[in-house]
Amino acid sequence: MESLKPSAYNYHVALPDGTKLWFNFFTLSLIAFDSMDASLVHDIIRKPNASRRDSRRAVEIKKRLKDNGFLINRAVSEIDYIKQGYFKQRDAQKKDLSLTILPTLACNFRCIYCYEKHDALSMTPEVEEALIKMVDQNLSEKGSLFVTWFGGEPLLKLGTIGRLSSSFNEICTKKSGKYSSQVVTNGFLFNRENAESLRKNSVNNVQITLDGPGHIHDQRRPGVNGEKTFDAIISNIRDSAGIVPVNLRINVDQTNRKYIPELLELLSREGLAENVHPYLGRTYPYTEVCRDIAGQCLSAEDFSLLELETSMELINKGFFTFKIPRAVNIHCMAEKANAFVVTPSGGIVNCWNDASNPDAEIGHLLKPSTPQMEKNAQSWSQYNPFSSECSGCLLLPVCMGGCPYMSRSTGKPYCHEWKYHMDESLAMYYYLKTMEEQGRIIKEFQETVQEVKKIKILINEEVWR
């Protein structure tokens, strides 16, 4: 008989009605048991190999727990499996390629918390040519190329995006591969004409930031000359979100947190729930450029609670967006061997936060490698989330140590939002899954009713013939 043990990534919470939720952060399985089964489930998980006169119900529960990863073979090491997946994805030169490309560092905004140095530097034809050559050399047959257009403000250089996208599509066609991309923009230039251009250039979605209603947003994200930007962005989203879907980031800190409901109410009135997907971003003093906003930033625990409260507000207003945990082998592209950030000058760095920092370059499209570049690359390759407290964390499979830039900078992990309000987050997730299931049942019922109506009409037509 197989010897079993509980997974190291099991978590449970009791709901007010007596329902007991069990969630596994390794398999992402969620199971709800009523109060009658709760004690039996606890007993089975605590002593999975105990000799007992198992009832039919106990046998069913034990099988269900095993099938969903709550009980595993005693010989299995989940942490070894996680480590294997991490290092395989980090170190392997896979056939796919992921790039964040900055066509320019210039920006038409002056956001109060921006961590980049603003200058007019933009990609030259020489850099574009070298970048195309790099993609051609590094993308394997039948590989996928994914690009994030970043800045500065990337829409200031639509011509660069168009030229490079055309070349990337040609390379992917030649190699029987696939090309797709997204744009991170402030939204000021996201008008209908530009949205159509982005869609033609294989842009699948855009990220735009609004930091509150107009009177708050315009203080935090003014134009380069102090001009208001909110109304233009809202108008652009209204006109263009149906062309290219919008992920709407709301950067929050102590100064604007109370205005989030007002912004969500405005978005709901504008009828943007179907095409816009809001989520919160936590402002943080990533670099020396934005150190003066440090005192306004939310703690990780504060941000976690605010995110949960905002999720409830979003649901009430018809925005079905909730940050559910997802299994990851690696936290972000900065750790991957086949992912790079390319700056306008042709510099190559690992992380977005270093996009305007030439001292962080690990390579260059136009220049030979230097000892400093090699040292930078080696430093990133030595990063290991398993050498910290993260290795024993319940949320490791969905967090993988968090932001490596923050960990390297502060020596502390940048934890997953669920860590601080696990019970409430899990209850919310269960609520959403229940709503989703009810919606599916209602949809199936409505479809069945329509089919019955069609059959009835056909029968009546047959009778009258």
Image (tube, helix red, strand yellow):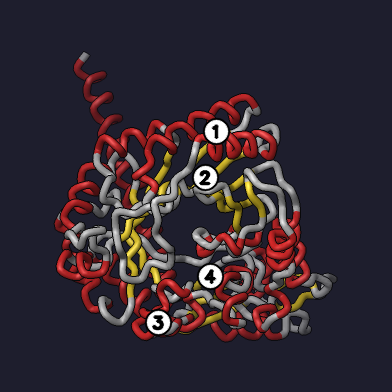
Q: Residues within 10 Å of mark 2 (few under 14, many from 20)?
A: many
**Number of the label disc, if any, that sits on residue 168:** 1
Q: Are marks 2 and 1 in contact (CB under 8 Å)?
A: yes
Q: Which of the two marks, 1 or 4, is nearer to us in this view?
A: 1
Q: Which secondary structure lies at badge 1?
A: helix
Left or right: residue 263 versus residue 124 is left
Counting from the top left corner in percent of width and height, residue 343 is at 52, 51
Q: Quadrant of residue 464?
A: top left
Question: Is 132 placed above or below 23 here?
Answer: above
The earlier-in-sequence mark between 1 and 4 is 4
Q: Which secondary structure lies at badge 4?
A: strand
Q: Residues within 10 Å of mark 3 (few under 14, many from 20)?
A: some
The earlier-in-sequence mark between 3 and 4 is 4
Counting from the top left corner in percent of width and height, residue 166 is at 49, 29
**Number of the label disc, if any, that sits on residue 294:** 3
Q: Is residue 76 shown to the viewer in this render?
A: yes
Q: Are marks 1 and 3 in contact (CB under 8 Å)?
A: no
Q: Report how far apart the C-alphas of labels 3 and 4 lie in the structure.
A: 41 Å
Q: Report how far apart the C-alphas of labels 1 and 4 lie in the structure.
A: 44 Å
Closer-to-camera residue (107/333) = 107
Counting from the top left corner in percent of width and height, residue 423 is at 46, 82
Question: Is 72 placed above or below 210 here?
Answer: below
Q: Report how far apart the C-alphas of labels 1 and 3 lie in the structure.
A: 40 Å
Three-letter code, disc 3: Ala
Q: Report how far apart the C-alphas of labels 3 and 2 lie in the structure.
A: 31 Å
Left or right: residue 365 versus residue 320 is right
Question: Is 123 placed above or below 349 here?
Answer: above
Q: Identify residue for label 4.
A: 31
Q: Are marks 2 and 4 in contact (CB under 8 Å)?
A: no
The earlier-in-sequence mark between 1 and 3 is 1
Q: Identify residue for label 2.
A: 147
